[in-house]
Amino acid sequence: MIDRQTGLLISIKSPEAIAQAIITYKNDPQLRANMAENGYQHIANNFTVENTVDETLAMYETLKNELL
């Protein structure tokens, strides 16, 4: 999640911050739509099958090298 681009980063320990985020979304339909579209594009561009496989293989390679 990218704060203020794909969502609002807030502290889960702050009821006031949670309430303010809800109010912000409630009062701004364009913001909701923009963040939804930005979130979709971020996932589509960064979490492809190819990227996921490459990152998983790289992680396993790193672990293998650390254990040898």
Image: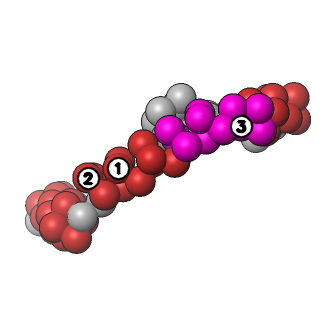
Please, what secondary structure does the residue beneath circle 1 have?
helix
Relative to 55, is 25 above or below? above
For the residue pair 32 and 11, the one nearer the viewer reads as: 32
Q: Position of residue 25 (x, y in %)?
A: 71, 37
Residue type beneath disc 3? Tyr
Residue type beneath disc 1? Gln
* Crowd tier of the residue under label 3, counting other residues whose Cα lies within 10 Å: few below 14, some 14–19, many 20 or above: some
Q: Is residue 32 magenta?
A: yes
State left or right for residue 54 relative to residue 25.
left
Q: Position of residue 36 (x, y in %)?
A: 52, 48
Residue at image mark 2: 45
Residue at image mark 3: 25
Question: Quadrant location of the C terminus?
Answer: bottom left
Residues at badges 3 and 1 in contact (C-beta under 8 Å)? no
Relative to 47, is 35 above or below? above
Q: Main secondary structure of the magenta part?
A: helix
Alpha carbons under labels 3 and 1: distance apart: 19 Å
Please, what secondary structure does the residue beneath circle 3 have?
helix
Give the image's coloring scheme.
Answer: secondary structure
Q: Is residue 62 magenta?
A: no
Q: Quadrant of residue 7?
A: top right
For the residue pair 55 and 17, the one nearer the viewer reads as: 17
Magenta residues (range) = 25-35
Residues at badges 2 and 1 in contact (C-beta under 8 Å)? yes
Please, what secondary structure does the residue beneath circle 2 have?
helix
Residue at image mark 1: 41
